[in-house]
Amino acid sequence: MTDDKALRLTDDDGQEADFRQLCRFDLRGKTYVVLEDLEDEDSVIIFSVETDEEGEEVLCAVEDEDESEEAFYFFQAEMDDYDFGPAV
């Protein structure tokens, strides 16, 4: 992973996957990040950004379906204006 916005996540089963951060946005007082799976560039996942007890940012699954849909639709609407960087 050489991309400075790339990160490796581990799921509940211990499986690792590499992602690239596409964007970060605020919506209704919460911060979200959109991650693209580096193995499947057609797949994105949205996490909310929370702060833990030590003041560190942590990614949290968005479990509320309405919140998840709203964040995804917001991301889709903003995609046209977002600079994804150079094409590979």
Image (cartoon, rainbow, N blue to C red):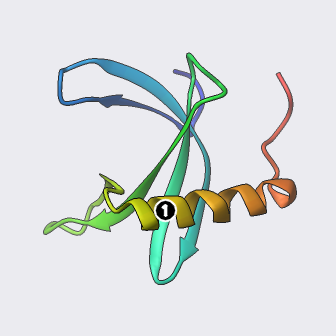
Residue 53: horizontal and vertical position, in percent?
13, 69
Secondary structure under the numbered disc 1 in the rendered image: strand
Q: At 31% across and 66% down in the image, what residue appears?
A: 50
Closer to the camera in the image, 72 or 51: 72
Q: At 65% across and 61% down in the image, what residue appears?
A: 73
Q: From this view, report whether residue 5 is shown above or below residue 48.
A: above
Closer to the camera in the image, 46 or 86: 46
Residue 74: horizontal and vertical position, in percent?
65, 65
Report whether 47 appears left or right of 2: left
Q: At 46% across and 24% down in the image, what residue appears?
A: 18
- According to the picture, the residue beneath numbered tag 1 turns out to be 32
Image quadrant in which you'd find residue 77: bottom right
The C terminus lies in quadrant = top right
Density class for disc 1 (Cα within 10 Å; few <14, some 14-19, many ≥20) is many
Residue 31: horizontal and vertical position, in percent?
47, 69
Report whether 79 appears left or right of 60: right
Q: From this view, report whether residue 76 is shown above or below residue 74.
A: above
Image quadrant in which you'd find residue 41: top right
| Amino acid type for the residue under numbered disc 1 | Tyr
Residue extending farthest to the bottom is 29
Q: At 59% across and 20% down in the image, what residue appears?
A: 40
Q: From this view, report whether residue 32 is shown above or below residue 83.
A: below
Report whether 32 appears left or right of 57: right
Residue extending farthest to the left is 53
Closer to the camera in the image, 73 or 84: 73
Q: How many marks?
A: 1
Q: From this view, report whether residue 9 is shown above or below residue 14.
A: below
Residue extending farthest to the front is 66
Image quadrant in which you'd find residue 24: bottom right
Closer to the camera in the image, 15 or 87: 15
